[in-house]
Amino acid sequence: HPDKRRWFDMISVEANISWWVVFRALLDATGNKQYADGLKRLKSFFVERAYDATAGIFHNRLQFRDGKWQALEGFSSQCQLWAILAIDGAGIKEWYHDSRLVENLWQNTKKYAGGFKGKTLAGIDFTDWRNNPDTNGRDPLVSFERTAAAVLAARIAGDIDAERVLRKV
């Protein structure tokens, strides 16, 4: 298949956030320096490549093209929510020297992936359902997994109203 090679040249930001959690737990359990080294390398990846400061979001995926890593289009609510939940909120703010980073990730998640009933947030979709060509103009799909993560992310971001509403979904 002509596209077979491209999958070896791709990095999933969400999967790397998951590796952050694994290395953090292994470091806490063992104290082994190799996990601290892994965390340091992951932090470098997140800071240098995974976050788009202009858009205020984490990329979904990157692909190695023309000798460098390039972001692929597409919004993933899971990347934003998992970054808020899995990487210590205070730590992630320090990485990017942005005291509002967590709040901005949350606001952008609502903006791009929020499913609303009127003005009330009803849940979180997997993606930017309005602008993703793969969604074909469908209505938002409220994902239980994303919405449950959104309850916790809203709490961390200090959005008490959204947390209260989402808890009822």
Image: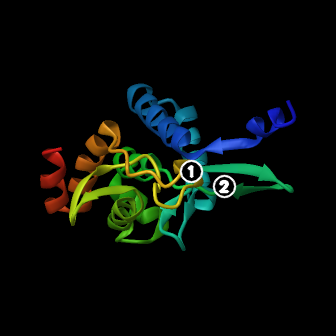
Residue at x 52% of width, y 49% of height: 135
Q: Nearer the viewer, residue 7 or 36?
A: 7
Q: Nearer the viewer, residue 127 or 64?
A: 127
- Whether 93 is drawn above or below 89: the answer is below
Q: Is residue 124 left or right of residue 27?
A: left
For badge 1, the amino acid type reads Asn
For badge 2, the amino acid type reads Leu
- Whether 15 is drawn above or below 134: the answer is above
Q: Nearer the viewer, residue 41 or 160?
A: 160
Q: Is residue 90 visible?
A: yes
Q: Secondary structure at mark 1?
A: loop
In the picture, the quarter occupied by the N terminus is top right
Q: Which residue is mark 2?
A: 72
Residue farthest toward the top in the current orientation of the protein: 30
Of mark 1 and mark 2, the one earlier in the sequence is 1
Determine contact: label 1, label 2, CB under 8 Å.
yes
Q: Which residue is mark 1?
A: 60
- Any mark on residue 81, and which? none
Image location of residue 37, percent across then percent down:
58, 41
Q: Count of labels shown?
A: 2
Image location of residue 159, percent across then percent down:
20, 62
Residue at x 35% of width, y 71% of height: 99
Mark 1 residue crowding within 10 angstroms, few (<14) / some (14–19) / many (20+):
many
- Whether 12 is drawn above or below 140: the answer is above
Residue at x 79% of width, y 40% of height: 6
